[in-house]
Amino acid sequence: MRYIKVTALSHTGLVRDHNEDSLVAGPWTLCGTVTENPQTLVFPLGKPLVVAVADGIGGQPAGEVASALIVRQLASFGPSLDSEEAVRDALNICNHVVYAAADRDPALLTMGTTVAGAVVLAESLLVFNVGDSRVFDATQDRLRQVSVDDSPPLPRGQRTTSLITQALGGAPRFSAITPHVTTSPLSAGDRYLVCTDGLTDPVPEDALGDVLRVHDDGRAAFELWKAAIEAGGPDNITLAMIGIGA
């Protein structure tokens, strides 16, 4: 029987004083906490399985609250996410949930979060994101980004930016979103990386690819985290490796 293996890790990094990232893998969520070691979960391939990260917007209140709200919502939607339309509807609901929570508590005003992930179906993969957290296809020798960054154009020579052009929540008044959702075929041996920008900002894409060419599963997650730490660990680091087994 084919199966889905998910290996996940979340860490504060070396600069931030707390973790505003959250993660979901099927019914399992990790919100604002730190994993001492990569955690591996195995699921049967068949019903929709969502794997996603959410990165609370820094410099605004309660990023950890916003990111936790999103992954818990996605966990509850889980088995119903069987099409691009269903994923778009779920993300639009998530956006409303963040704004509704902020409306109920003035201390949460302007809280927001990015989200990026994939829904694994029996024969295909639905990739989605809002913001600048990323999804990569790591199946081939060359890492390939399959999410779409919601960031302004970068000046020549600049590789990263902290600015984002849309998020879930994050504004004083409700702002609609346009989620990025695409479908790809799925086969045994396929491998994907889902991560927050705490990994991709300090570690260039070619360096991530070098790690994934050599390592897999828990060792891959550890080595990716290690690369971000050795690059200064300037932000929270959250990642999930998705592998399709035969």
Image (spheres, grey):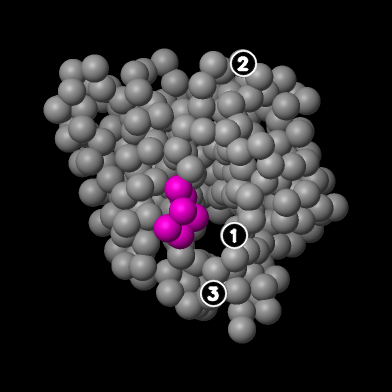
Residue range in magenta is 24-29
CA separation in Å, label 3 and label 2: 38 Å
Residue 244 % position (x, y): 63, 69
Left or right: where does residue 220 sit relative to residue 147? right
Q: Residue furthest right?
A: 214
Q: Is disc 3 in contact with disc 1, using a CB cutoff of under 8 Å?
A: no
The residue positioned 58% from the left and 26% from the top of the image is 12
Q: Tag 2 or tag 1, which sits nearer the N-term?
A: 2
CA separation in Å, label 3 and label 1: 10 Å
Residue tagged 2: 15
What residue type is disc 3 on?
A: Pro
Left or right: where does residue 164 sit relative to residue 34? left
Residue tagged 3: 44
CA separation in Å, label 1 and label 2: 29 Å
What residue type is disc 1 on?
A: Leu
The residue positioned 35% from the left and 43% from the top of the image is 70
Residue tagged 1: 41
Residue 187 in view in this figure? no
Q: Name the front one of labels 1 and 2.
A: 1
Residue 195 sits in quarter: top right
Residue 200 % position (x, y): 63, 35
Callout 2 environment at 10 Å: few (<14), some (14 to 19), or many (20+)?
Answer: few
Residue 150 % position (x, y): 44, 37
Main secondary structure of the magenta stretch: strand
